[in-house]
Amino acid sequence: MKFQVSFNVNEKLFLRNPESSVLGKKIIKYSIELIHEIGFENFTFKKLSIQIQTTEASIYRYFENKHRLLLYILNWYWCYMNFLVNTSIENISEPKIKLKIIIELLANDLKTKSGTLDYNIEAINQIVISESSKAYLVKDIKNINKDHVFQPFKDLCTKIASIINEYNPSFKFARSLSSTIIETSHTQQYFAKNLPKLTDLQSGKPEDFTLKFLENIVFKLLD
Amino acid sequence: MKFQVSFNVNEKLFLRNPESSVLGKKIIKYSIELIHEIGFENFTFKKLSIQIQTTEASIYRYFENKHRLLLYILNWYWCYMNFLVNTSIENISEPKIKLKIIIELLANDLKTKSGTLDYNIEAINQIVISESSKAYLVKDIKNINKDHVFQPFKDLCTKIASIINEYNPSFKFARSLSSTIIETSHTQQYFAKNLPKLTDLQSGKPEDFTLKFLENIVFKLLD
DNA sequence: TATAAATAATAGTATTACTATCATTAAAAG
DNA sequence: CTTTTAATGATAGTAATACTATTATTTATA
């Protein structure tokens, strides 16, 4: 399946729309690769500019700083997840099946769901797992949040919460459960891979383990 | 209740033991205040040195870098939590009550449990909520982990897992549930305070909400 | 073809994240 | 009570980071 995906990412995220030029698209494509490779802390506009043979100044015309660039990548991901969730459950009537599909998507099945994309979806996935909390765990969160830069994340959370309540209308913590399974899908995958003592992974892949764990908790909670 | 608490923090965390000198203790005390005040990203040894009227070089004699200092603070916290958990459930026989007490401690009741301490426990709490994931979400995690700097965190996780299995021996995900409730206690408090749309908080304190949520999920899962 | 917009090339600044050196002061040992 | 050692202060310096500014050149659009 080959399809072109682009989303209307919040304009406050960038100074100049990276989708609007070749250089802009290169910035996104290679920042994904570079952040994945060296981690967000070690990532700089200087290093990126060398890799794509441009200058720091050129990148600064697109993004105020690297935090905004990270937010841009995460927004793209959250929009993509919203899209995948919506299309994957479109024709499903059973809320239980819907939830199962969503959990599979969260526990990293989206790489198999994705066709050919402009961006390296596996790298984005790893960035989401390792770096996404750094987007909101910042001192200036209150001001940053005013620009609605977390809207797609909240939308995803709201969507999943609505299906949780569709499945069990009396459950009182749909949003918190929703944000918890999103975050836990990242944390448990990360722990399983890097600090396995914090998990019950015995053998097999971190993704498969996370899937089983999430299914276990979600359906025990809602049944 | 006034008591003096000190723990044998892993020697790999520091170059010179901060507990061994007046300056060392000042470094810890005021780094807690400063990280709490300006956030870990904005925190520098230079700023700290100005506040405690010493030099950057002097601080570097205690800690290799600010990441190690953060790890030191978190280790202190994890050791303290281990201590609090152990003393709080010492005389309890019912595993359910033990779990309830632990959840209360996680959902921030520890400030009421703590007497007069050398360090600002409320500031440490906020640091744990906002900064602790930055201790492990680093590219070099595999090497850092070799120094056993996450041991007290793993110990806490193991302890809670053992009580989970004491309460319900057939539950297959005790460690993952344990690490999940620890992380979720931070995430939900942070979301409730800063991105409340990601939670079901209607009114009241983030701590109280988090407590209810955690109790709900833990006992629904284990009963 | 003219005009505007985007990019490249270059330079520069303040801050960060350190390392090094040497003088001074405080603590411990003889 | 001096000697030695260890800790701290004072100072300097470097490479990298996180930007901003200026001007020339290229590319796109009118």
Image (cartoon, coloured by chain):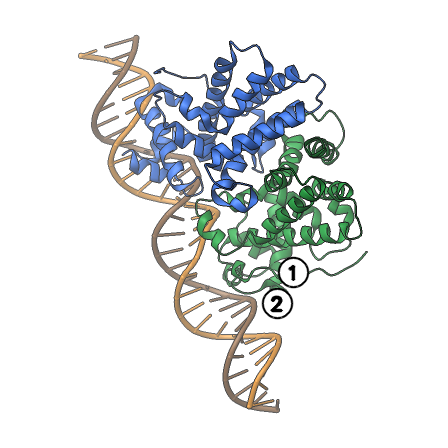
Chain colours: A blue, B green, C orange, D brown
Q: Which of C7 and A175 is in front in this view?
A: A175
Q: Nearer the viewer, residue B177 or C7?
A: B177
Above or below for A29 versus A202: above
Residue B193: x, y in percent? 67, 32
Mark 1 neighbour density, 10 Å: few (under 14) some (14–19) many (20 or more): few
Left or right: residue B140 versus residue A136 is left
Q: Residue at x 32, y 27 (%)?
A: A26
Q: What residue type is labelled 1?
A: Phe
Residue B80: x, y in percent? 68, 53
Q: Residue at x 40, y 30 (%)?
A: A122
What residue is shown with label 2?
B20
Mark 2 neighbour density, 10 Å: few (under 14) some (14–19) many (20 or more): few
Q: Quadrant of residue B40?
A: top right
Does the rendering let one see residue B199? no
Does the rendering let one see residue A61? yes
Q: Nearer the viewer, residue B79 or A136?
A: B79
**In the rendered picture of this protein, how many numbered marks are placed on residues?**
2
Q: Which residue is drawn at 56% across and 41% down?
A: A200
What residue is shown with label 1?
B7
Dot 2 and dot 1 within a common chain? yes
Q: Could you give the CA–CA distance between mark 2 and mark 1, rounded to whole angstroms?
A: 12 Å
Query: Which quadrant would the C terminus of chain B be assigned to in this image?
Result: top right
Above or below for B156 versus A150: below
Residue under mark 1: which chain is it in? B
Residue A186: x, y in percent? 52, 34
Nearer the N terminus, badge 2 or badge 1?
A: 1
Secondary structure beneath disc 1?
loop
Q: Which amino acid does label 2 sit on?
A: Ser
